[in-house]
């Protein structure tokens, strides 16, 4: 059996370089690959294009990479809770491509499944449709969206084994499930890395073939409450 286990996060991120396109799983502050993000923050890697549902908050998630100005472009759906993101976008320092949330998910899933493009009605007649092929299906206009092309996909799971099989917990499944296998190399950080054979095959959400590198994260924060409070204020 080929082991995909990396001994630490530094080994897991080997090969990530300036200017690359990287997908990050997570929704809200749930299921964020935070150990990998922390390791990237400790490098001088810059000019990244990040594909992620959100841009984190000021002190968590992709917000940490934004603070260090390591991101050149964000492709996201929901970006409303990060002051530094807003500042960089309005000043023109950061390129931003906003995309409907379902389209974002499907562009990941298409990349995962090897489907080059698909048609969706979301965004037709808006700025999102600019420059895209439009076609009518069943009396309704659709636009063509292309699968993402990412150098790395970085996901967070609850449990995984050395063959890369993954189990997510609760809502942390979110974008992690459609991003696993959607980059040239998928890195999975897990709360618990277990020997092959110890996961119940019926519980596995992502088969190991989608994952090239796996490691056990050292520290996972519980941040849901903090963001709920911020959002209300
Ligand atoms: C509302 C959302 O789309 C959640 C997020 O911040 O990812």
Image (tube, rainbow, N blue to C red):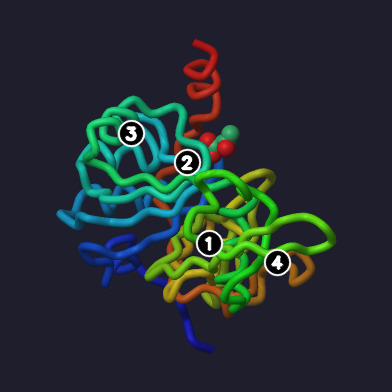
Report the residue marked by disc 3.
85
Q: Residue furthest left?
A: 44
Q: Is mark 2 within 8 Å of ligand 1?
A: yes
Mark nearer the viewer, 1 or 4: 1
Residue 204: assigned label: 4
Expressed as whole percent of the image width and height from the top left, the position of residue 206 reads: 64, 68
| Mark closest to the chain's N terminus, 1 or 4 | 1
- Whether residue 191 is visible, yes or no, is no
Expressed as whole percent of the image width and height from the top left, the position of residue 175 reads: 58, 53
Distance from disc 3 to disc 4, alpha carbons, whole Å, reads: 35 Å
Mark nearer the viewer, 2 or 1: 1
At 50% from the left and 45% from the top, the residue drawn is 127
Packing grade of label 1 (10 A; few <14, some 14-19, many >=20) is few
Query: What secondary structure is marked by label 2?
Result: loop
Ligand 1 falls in quadrant: top right
Q: Residue furthest bottom?
A: 1
Expressed as whole percent of the image width and height from the top left, the position of residue 226 reads: 48, 22
Residue 54: assigned label: 2
The reply to whether dot 4 and dot 2 touch (C-beta < 8 Å) is no
| Mark closest to the chain's N terminus, 2 or 1 | 2
Q: Between 226 and 158, which is closer to the camera in this rendering? A: 226
| Mark closest to the chain's N terminus, 4 or 2 | 2
Distance from disc 4 to disc 2, alpha carbons, whole Å, reads: 26 Å
């Amino acid at each position: 059996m080929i082991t995909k286990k990396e001994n630490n996060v530094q080994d897991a991120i080997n090969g990530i370089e300036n200017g690359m396109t990287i997908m990050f799983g997570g929704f809200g502050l749930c299921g964020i690959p935070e150990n990998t993000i922390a390791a990237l923050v400790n490098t001088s890697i810059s000019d990244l294009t990040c594909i992620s549902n959100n841009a984190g908050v000021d002190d968590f998630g992709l917000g940490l990479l934004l603070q260090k100005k390591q991101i050149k472009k964000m492709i996201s759906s929901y970006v409303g809770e990060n002051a530094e993101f807003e500042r960089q976008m309005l000043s023109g320092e950061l390129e931003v491509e906003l995309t409907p949330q379902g389209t974002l998910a499907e562009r990941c899933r298409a990349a995962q499944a090897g489907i080059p493009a698909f048609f969706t009605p979301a965004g037709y007649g808006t700025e999102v449709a600019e420059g895209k092929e439009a076609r009518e299906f069943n009396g309704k206009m659709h636009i063509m969206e292309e699968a993402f092309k990412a150098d790395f996909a970085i996901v967070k799971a609850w449990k995984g084994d050395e063959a890369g099989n993954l189990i997510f917990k609760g809502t942390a499944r979110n974008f992690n499930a459609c991003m696993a296998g959607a980059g040239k190399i998928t890195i999975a950080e897990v709360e618990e890395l277990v020997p092959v054979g110890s996961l119940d095959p019926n519980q596995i959400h992502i088969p190991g073939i989608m994952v090239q590198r796996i490691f056990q994260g050292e520290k996972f924060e519980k941040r849901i409450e903090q963001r709920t409070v911020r959002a209300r204020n």
